[in-house]
Image: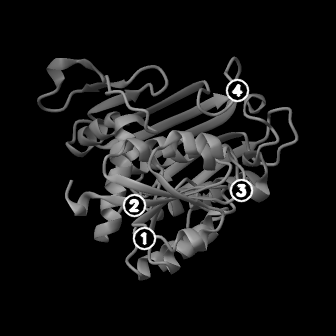
Amino acid sequence: MPTQDRFSVGFVTTENPHSLMHMRTLEVLPEVEAVHVCHLGGGDRDAIRQASSKIVSESENLEEMLKHDVDALLVSVRNDECPSVLDAAIDAGKGALFEKPGALTADRLRGIADAAGGKNLTMGTMLTFRNDPVILDVKRAVNGGTLGDIMAVEARQVTSQVRYRDPNFWLFDKSKAGSGILSWLGCHHIDALCYLLDDRIESVSAMVDTKNPFPIDVEDTACLVVRFKSGVLGTIHAGYHLVGSSSGYSGARYDAFMALRGTEGYVRIPLSERGGYSLNSIADGWASGGVRDYSFTPPSSPAYGGVAGEEFVRQFLHASRDGETALASIEAMVHVLDIIEAAIESSETGRMVTVR
């Protein structure tokens, strides 16, 4: 393999549900030749070690790990710990791909984005829908005018109740997580709608609450009505609501869905039911087909997000080396956090809030 296609990655981890999944991604990427692991506390170190044959060093000190000749960082830490890791990466001149949301507040992440931009460093986040084959297919249909002018969109991300996810886990502690279901899972759907429309949300009316019977201090239920800058309206619902799930985060039950409806057609994406989508369009060249059902059978991969997840991380590594933009940039996550903060403010004040 040419030298320009070989990478040494610094993997920074704490107790994050996705750390082991990310290590498996690095293990299967042929471009990744070496992994330097920094354990900042918590997590299953033995499981991390067993997941990869590429680990060449381990440390508990970020400064020590950054002394190695790493090309970029993959960061899978608690939300409150991520900003300091990203600050250190910038100081060391390294790009980083981080677990969302990356910070407790939009302003903190915005400052990191500005600092990275000033040094032409690539910062990306794990909003992986941006490389999902179904989402990419639907985006091509939207861009090609198959749906006409989009009028409204909707998204739903409902998953297992808090009881299956350990109510004492840091994701349910505002001081460590920042917010709840919206920043951990709803963020994917918020960003996917923005990506599909190539648009930004400008205003939000929302109600959020904590409905699970546990003493957590972040929202576990959220209902948003949004307006995009183009005028498209949308609804977004997220919640930890489903019973009958396995414990933990890797095998949770989901009820997830997205839809886009335009003047010439609509798309339904039953995300939790099957790999595919349905499209109905009366646009030129489409009307004779009626409702079209598309199905996908992705190749198998142990990587987080499958082969699409491999491609997502691979793109980041090359973008970081070349000073280009990641598939899901840090700026995309800043916008999502702005939306989430507007939603929480709307719920607290009972009024529509303009997104920064």
Q: Which label was assigned to residue 69?
A: 1
As shown in the figure, which amino acid type bears the numbered disc 4?
A: Ser
Q: Distance of mark 4 from mark 3, alpha carbons?
A: 23 Å
Residue, far right: 215
Pinpoint residue 120: horizontal percent, then vertical percent: 37, 77
Say if mark 2 contacts mark 1, CB within 8 Å: yes
Q: In this rendering, would 114 be left or right of 205?
A: left
Among the two numbered marks 3 and 1 on one chain, the one whose residue lies closer to the N terminus: 3
Q: Which residue is mark 4?
A: 247
Identify the residue at image location x=27%, y=41%: 142
Q: Which residue is mark 2?
A: 8
Among the two numbered marks 2 and 1 on one chain, the one whose residue lies closer to the N terminus: 2
Question: Mark 3, mark 1: which one is toward the viewer?
Answer: 1
Among the two numbered marks 1 and 4 on one chain, the one whose residue lies closer to the N terminus: 1
Q: Quadrant of residue 75?
A: bottom right
Say if mark 1 contacts mark 4, CB within 8 Å: no
Between 251 and 174, the one nearer to me in the picture: 251
Q: Distance of mark 2 from mark 1, alpha carbons?
A: 7 Å
Say if mark 2 contacts mark 4, CB within 8 Å: no
Identify the element where label 3 is drawn.
Answer: loop
Say if mark 3 contacts mark 1, CB within 8 Å: no
Pinpoint residue 256: horizontal percent, then vertical percent: 52, 29
Identify the residue at image location x=70%, y=44%: 207
Q: Distance of mark 1 from mark 4, alpha carbons?
A: 39 Å
Q: Which label was assigned to residue 125?
A: none
